């Protein structure tokens, strides 16, 4: 699992990165929200740990920007701002959790694991618009104007993954991990087959959204 930590306290960040590495997480670190946006364009993350008081672009501004862009990567605020009103504003802005410094590492680890255990259907609960598409997760239905199609369970899981990372390049390994887990009997061509099926679904309803192949890396849902 890969985590992006945006934290300007260098000593605290290095210490936390070290503990996360001990528990099997790969962690990238940057010190302001502007750099965080750059990292999100280059990599795909399972979770973001976000401070609120950041230089250049603060945590709330960063969160508002990525949510407006449709990026639904889970976010945990880790901050020294602990007033109830600030917690509420952070959660209402789109954060998935809010943890006040100082905290015990084991509590953060428990919160991370809780978020990462959530089934896909809890990550996308309501109809979502992307470009000319409207996605209805409860019905596994994809609509474009008056046209619609029903996705299979695997197509649905795959589309939700792209939906939560619009315009981001998703590496093949990341997609395999998210959709098939560590199943050793899944062949590499299975992903290509489902991408082919999903592309046909999108074309069948005449959408302008493109599921693009990024040669040597993976795939990108271009809105």
Image: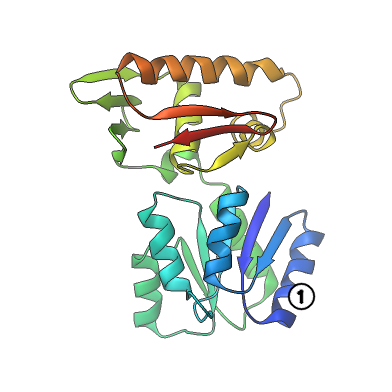
x then y, percent, for residue 61: 41, 70
Position of 3 compared to 157: left or right? right
In the rendered image of this protein, does residue 57 appear above or below residue 24?
below
Dot 1: element: helix
Can you say whether 126 is above or below 10 in the image? above
Q: Which residue is mark 1?
A: 15
Residue 71, position as x, y percentages in the image: 45, 50
Residue at the (74%, 67%) spot, across then down:
17
Tell me where residue 157 appears, x and y as whole percent: 49, 30
Residue 59 lies left or right of residue 45; in this view the side is left
Q: Nearer the viewer, residue 214 or 175?
A: 214
Q: Quadrant of residue 110?
A: bottom right
Residue 34 visible, this orientation: yes
Residue drawn at 32 percent across, 25 percent down: 142
Name the spot of residue 3 as percent of width and height, x first.
65, 57
Which is nearer the eye, 21 or 37?
A: 37
Image quarter (top left, top right, bottom left or bottom right) of the C terminus: top left
């Amino acid at each position: 699992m890969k985590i992006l930590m945006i934290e300007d306290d260098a000593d605290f960040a290095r210490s936390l990165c070290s503990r996360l590495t001990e528990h099997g997480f790969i962690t990238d670190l940057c010190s302001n929200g502007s750099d965080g946006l750059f990292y999100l364009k280059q990599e795909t993350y399972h979770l973001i740990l976000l401070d609120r008081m950041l230089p250049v672009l603060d945590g709330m501004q960063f969160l508002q920007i990525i949510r407006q862009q449709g990026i639904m990567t889970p976010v945990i605020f880790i901050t020294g701002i602990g007033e109830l009103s600030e917690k509420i504003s952070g959660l209402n802005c789109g954060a998935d959790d809010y943890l006040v410094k100082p905290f015990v590492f084991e509590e953060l680890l428990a919160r991370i694991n809780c978020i990462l255990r959530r089934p896909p259907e809890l990550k996308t609960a309501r109809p979502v618009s992307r470009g000319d598409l409207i996605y209805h997760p409860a019905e596994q239905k994809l609509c474009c104007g008056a046209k619609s199609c029903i996705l299979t369970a695997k197509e649905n899981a795959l589309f939700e993954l792209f939906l939560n990372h619009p315009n981001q390049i998703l590496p093949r390994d990341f997609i395999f991990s998210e959709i098939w887990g560590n199943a050793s009997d899944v062949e590499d061509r299975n992903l290509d087959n489902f991408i082919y099926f999903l592309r046909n679904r999108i074309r069948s309803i005449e959408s302008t959204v493109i599921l693009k192949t990024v040669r040597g890396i993976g795939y990108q849902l271009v809105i």
